[in-house]
Image (cartoon, helix red, strand yellow):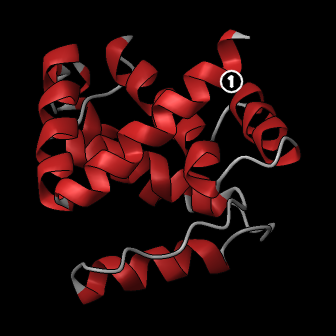
Amino acid sequence: MPEKETIERAREDAREGKSPSTQAGEFVREEMDHIREGKHGARSTKQAIAIGLSKARRAGVSLPPPKGGASEVRRKAEQDSEAAGSRRAPSKKRSRATTNALKREGTKAASKASLSRQARTSARDRGAASRSSAAKKAARTRARNSR
């Protein structure tokens, strides 16, 4: 269950008209914080991000399933989106089992180096044009915010 503070920050992003991925970023940030403070670990940075995105979808962020991905990953994303707004409490046994499994994993997945490596590799997969347009958009945002 995400913290109230995280849900509120995501809602604020939605009110400001920010993209679903920005809203979901709040949940990913929360997940990284949990790993850093030793609440639990993760096998990899990718897993930590996936947990955050899953929480975001379940909290009602309208994130589409990944375009290119394994069918089971897409199916899980759709399942999470459908679960948004459902009042059913999660299974205690399953929830505890998940937490215990994550507690056995390390905390390196949330380190600055791991996050940086993950960002670089995913950017490399996106291609030059995509990276260039993202950089231009970032420059525009910086210019707009520095006024």
Q: Quadrant of residue 60?
A: bottom right
- The residue lying toward the viewer, choosing from 18 and 80, is 18
- The residue lying toward the viewer, choosing from 41 and 70, is 70
Residue highlighted by disc 1:
144
Above or below: residue 75 compared with residue 107: below
Residue drawn at x 22%, y 47% is 46
Quadrant in which the N terminus is drawn: top right
Residue drawn at x 37%, y 74% is 66
- The residue lying toward the viewer, choosing from 61 and 130, is 130
Task: Tell me where residue 57 appears, x and y as whole percent.
Answer: 60, 62
Residue drawn at x 21%, y 82% is 70
Tell me if 137 is positioned left or right of 100 in this view: right
How many badges with numbers are in the image?
1
Q: Residues within 10 Å of mark 1 (few under 14, many from 20)?
A: few
Above or below: residue 41 compared with residue 53: above
Task: Tell me where residue 64 appears, x and y as whole percent.
Answer: 53, 74
Task: Tell me where residue 90 appears, x and y as whole percent.
Answer: 61, 60
Q: Quadrant of residue 71?
A: bottom left
Quadrant in which the C terminus is drawn: top right
Q: Considering the numbered disc 1 on the image, is that residue within a helix, a strand or a loop?
A: helix
Q: Is residue 90 visible?
A: no
Q: Is residue 41 visible?
A: yes
Task: Tell me where residue 96 appears, x and y as whole percent.
Answer: 43, 46
- The residue lying toward the viewer, choosing from 96 and 6, is 6
Residue drawn at x 20%, y 48% is 123
Q: Amino acid at mark 1?
A: Arg
Q: Quadrant of residue 3?
A: top right
Above or below: residue 44 compared with residue 70: above
